[in-house]
Image (cartoon, rainbow, N blue to C red):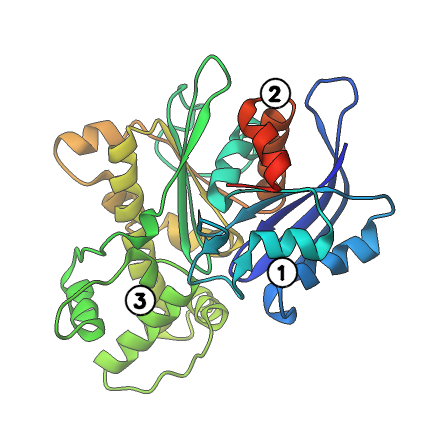
Amino acid sequence: MLFLAADIGGTHARVALMRASLDGSRVVETLGYRVFVCAQFPTLPKLLQTFIDADVRAPLKHCVLACAGQIVGDEVVNDNLAWPIHLRQLRNALGLDEVAVLNDFEALAYALDGSLAHGGRHLCGPGAPPSRGPTLVIGPGTGLGAAVHVPSPAGGFVLPTEAGQMDFASNSVREREILAHLAPDGGYVAFEHLVSGPGLLTLYTSLCTLHGESPKLATPEAVTTAAIGGSDMHALEAVEIFCAALGSFTGNLAMTFMATSVYLAGGFLSSVFELLKHSTFEERFLHGRSARTLLAQVPVWVTEHGRHGVQGAAQWYLERGMSGTATLRHAAASGVRA
């Protein structure tokens, strides 16, 4: 069984041609893999067709998408995607029999059953392997994604979230100043608006404004580079505030789900790992009083996003595709499943 697995984020799309094992072991083999910049394509069908033209030599009728956002009816709803995604339109454009869809961080959490759990750098908490319990996967990228993997004798299940849309709560005087600058009349400011790649740039430009200066840096990558090199004090402070706010966000979710381990995913965090390691992330993650005792037992790891999303999506698809459930049979008939 050949099928397409794609991890579609706000900036990059990771696409793979997968083959299910013929021996019934539910092992997935990757036959082709490419990373695309979403903004270079007018639509998702055009992007996927480019991969198919280059890497697929046999008829392809099945596809699983891990997408930032959630599925509402026939559409994937997310403000950070490069273009709207309409599932039936995608299926018809590529001549597919089935398009199955899950959230991108839901797919990453399913990868905890395989590759994702075996790598990464230890950030804080106990260094020993985590006890078996709920595991959080969190990642700031174009947006801020999060999901929780809950183990069970049957293999476990994943709860996707839109936690990045929760209200940001300031924890320091400087954060209050930034929040007042962003919302001078009050109102809703999401965590994602500050704890993400674009959020880092927002922090930097806000700090420049608060100091009465014009921003010199125009991209999140430039802010990161300047912070690592120590060449811009506002960039360094922006990264410090980013890391602290990420600590609060991660600790909040760890308490919500009583997590026993946390994985922070994404190339951005890997690039600033030393700054993150020496920031107030851990202090903000631990919170205080009884929560501190609980959260001090939770290890936090930083890992690359890499191929984990497409592998988790493929595993999710095969687990349900090979089970022959009524839900999947309905999906094959209708052509779309969320």
Nearer the observer: mark 1 or 3; the answer is: 1
Distance from the alpha carbon under mark 3 to that under mark 2: 51 Å
The residue under the point 70% across, 18% down is: 25
Per the image, the residue denoted by label 1 is 44
Depth check, front residue: 75 or 57: 75
In the depicted structure, whether residue 67 falls above or below residue 23 = below
Instruction: Name the residue rendered at 16%, 71% in the picture.
Output: 180
Q: Nearer the viewer, residue 1 or 267?
A: 1
- Residue 236: image location, x then y, percent: 36, 67
Secondary structure of residue under mark 2? loop
Tag 3: Cα neighbours inside 10 Å, few (<14), some, or many (≥20)?
some
Above or below, 233 relative to 55: below
Q: Position of residue 256 (x, y in %)?
A: 25, 34
Determine the residue positioned at 26% across, 82% down.
209
Give the Cα separation between the discs numbered 1 and 3. 37 Å
| Corner quadrant of residue 205 | bottom left
Which residue type carries mark 1? Answer: Leu
Give percent across and percent down for residue 204.
34, 72
Residue that carries the numbered disc 3 in the rendered image: 237
Q: Residue at x 72, y 39 (%)?
A: 3
**Circle nearer the N terminus (3, 2):** 3
Q: Give the residue at the far front of this rendering.
A: 333
The residue identified by callout 2 is 323
> Can I make out residue 115 in this image?
no
Q: Residues within 10 Å of mark 2 (few under 14, many from 20)?
A: few
Residue 61, position in %: x, y?
A: 74, 42
Task: Determine which quarter of the picture holds residue 171.
Answer: bottom left
Which is nearer the N-term, disc 2 or disc 1? 1
Mark 2–mark 1 Cα distance, whole angstroms, equals 29 Å
Q: Is residue 89 left or right of residue 191?
A: right
Q: Secondary structure at mark 3?
A: helix
Q: 232 or 209, which is in the foreground?
A: 209
